[in-house]
Image (tube, rainbow, N blue to C red):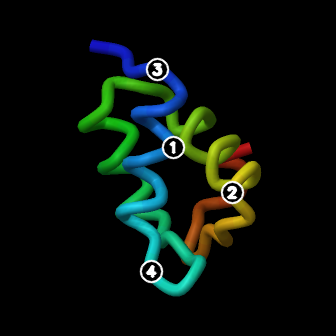
Amino acid sequence: MAKNSEEIKTAVQNAAKDGRLSCPVARKLASDLGVAPREIGQMANELKIKLYGCELGCFE
């Protein structure tokens, strides 16, 4: 079930620690929310949250 942007925003903010979000956590979050990893990456960018430990291009 796809989520709206506010639900994605809240989930990304809650999962991020010290303004950072690891790739495995972001990928699980995308899976749990039923959205593409790209949506998590876009929201992280909007929130100025840095993704780290990522496979190249996964969250563009």
Q: Give the spatial CA distance, label 4 vs label 2.
A: 13 Å
- Closer to the camera, 41 or 49? 49
In the image, which disc is placed on residue 48?
none
Q: Amino acid at mark 1?
A: Lys
Of the numbered discs 2 and 3, the one sitting upstream in the chain is 3
Q: Amino acid at mark 3?
A: Asn
Q: Amino acid at mark 4?
A: Lys
Q: Amino acid at mark 2?
A: Leu
Residue drawn at x 64%, y 54% is 44
Q: Secondary structure at mark 4?
A: loop
Q: Give the spatial CA distance, label 2 vs label 3.
A: 16 Å
Q: Secondary structure at mark 2?
A: loop
| CB within 8 Å, label 2 to label 1 | yes
Q: Give the spatial CA distance, label 2 vs label 1.
A: 8 Å
At label 1, counting other C-alpha atoms closer than 10 Å, the crowd grade (few under 14, some 14-19, many 20 or more) is some
Residue that numbered label 2 is attached to: 47
> Which quadrant would the N terminus be assigned to in this image?
top left
Residue that numbered label 3 is attached to: 4
Q: Give the spatial CA distance, label 1 vs label 4.
A: 14 Å
Residue drawn at x 37%, y 62% is 14
Of the numbered discs 2 and 1, the one sitting upstream in the chain is 1
In the image, which disc is placed on residue 17?
4
| CB within 8 Å, label 2 to label 3 | no
At label 4, counting other C-alpha atoms closer than 10 Å, the crowd grade (few under 14, some 14-19, many 20 or more) is few
Residue that numbered label 1 is attached to: 9
Residue drawn at x 60%, y 75% is 52
Asked if 18 appears above or below 7 in the picture, the reply is below
Q: Give the spatial CA distance, label 3 vs label 4.
A: 22 Å
